[in-house]
Amino acid sequence: MIPNRRLPVRLLLAFSLLLLPAAAGAQEVYNYSVGLFGSIGGSFDADPGNDLSNTGFQVNLGYVTEPSTHLVLRAGRLGLDKSDFFGSLSDAEMKYVTLGGEYRYHESVYDSGVFVAIGGYRLEGDAGSRRSTQDSWGVSVGATGELPIRRWLGIQAEISGHYVNFREAQFFGMAQGGIVLHF
C-alpha cells in the first residue's frame, strides 16, 4: 500500500522537473539596464513653436520587477528652440523625469514593449528680459523596441507622447534612439 501512496508524489515531482526549463527560459538574463539616447521631438500645439525637429537627450534606468515587466526611470532634456519662439518664450527647453511600468514582448529577433509613466516636467525660457520657469506633473505613454547585440548590449528606439499642463503647450511627441546596457 505504501508504494501506491508515493506514486502521485513521484509523478508530481517528475512533472515539475519537466517544467523547470520553461520557467528558466521565461526569466530575464539581467536585472538592471541603463540606456543613453538622442532625442528628436517637440510640441503639437505650441503657437508658435509646433516644430517636431527639436533635439535633446534621454537617460533610462530600468529594473526588472518580473519577467517581461520593468520599472523604468526616464530623465531627459528637449531643446525647444528650433523655432525662434516657443509660445511666448525664446531659448526654451523642457526637462523631465518620469517613472513608469514597461511591459516587454519577446520576439524572435528583437524585443518590443509599451509603457505608461507619470512624472515631473519643467519648461524654461526667456520671457523678455527675465527667465521664466513653469513646473507641472505630466503623463507619458509610448512604445519601445530593442535589438539585442550581446547579452549585455542592445540598440533601442522608442516613441512617446506626453501630456503636460504648461501655459505654452500641452501635447508633446518624442522619438529616441541609442544604446542600452544590461547587467
Image (spheres, grey):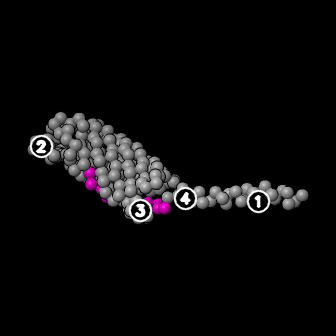
Query: For numbered disc 4, what is the local secondary structure?
Result: helix
Q: Is residue 118 visible?
A: no
Which of marks 4 and 3 precedes in the sequence? 4
Which of marks 3 and 1 precedes in the sequence? 1
Tell me how far mark 3 sits from mark 2, CA to CA.
Answer: 40 Å
Tell me how far mark 3 sits from mark 4, CA to CA.
Answer: 17 Å
Tell me how far mark 1 sits from mark 2, CA to CA.
Answer: 75 Å
Between 101 and 119, the one lying in front of the other is 101
Q: Residue at x 19, y 41 (%)?
A: 51
Residue to which mark 1 is pinned? 10
Q: Residue furthest front?
A: 108
- Is most of the magenta stretch helix, strand or loop? strand
Q: Amino acid at mark 1?
A: Arg
Is disc 2 surrounded by few (<14), some (14 to 19) or many (20+) residues within 10 Å?
few
Eye-nearest disc, 1 or 3: 1
- Pointer 1 and pointer 2: residues touching (CB < 8 Å)? no
Residue to which mark 2 is pinned? 84
Which of marks 4 and 2 precedes in the sequence? 4
- Pointer 2 and pointer 4: residues touching (CB < 8 Å)? no
Tell me how far mark 1 sits from mark 4, CA to CA.
Answer: 24 Å
Instruction: Provide the residue span drawn in magenta.
Output: 29-39
Q: Residue at x 34, y 49 (%)?
A: 158
- Pointer 1 and pointer 3: residues touching (CB < 8 Å)? no
Residue to which mark 4 is pinned? 25
Residue to which mark 3 is pinned? 182
Eye-nearest disc, 1 or 2: 1
Is disc 3 surrounded by few (<14), some (14 to 19) or many (20+) residues within 10 Å?
some
Left or right: 119 in relation to 48: right
Q: Residue at x 38, y 46 (%)?
A: 143
Between 137 and 37, the one lying in front of the other is 37
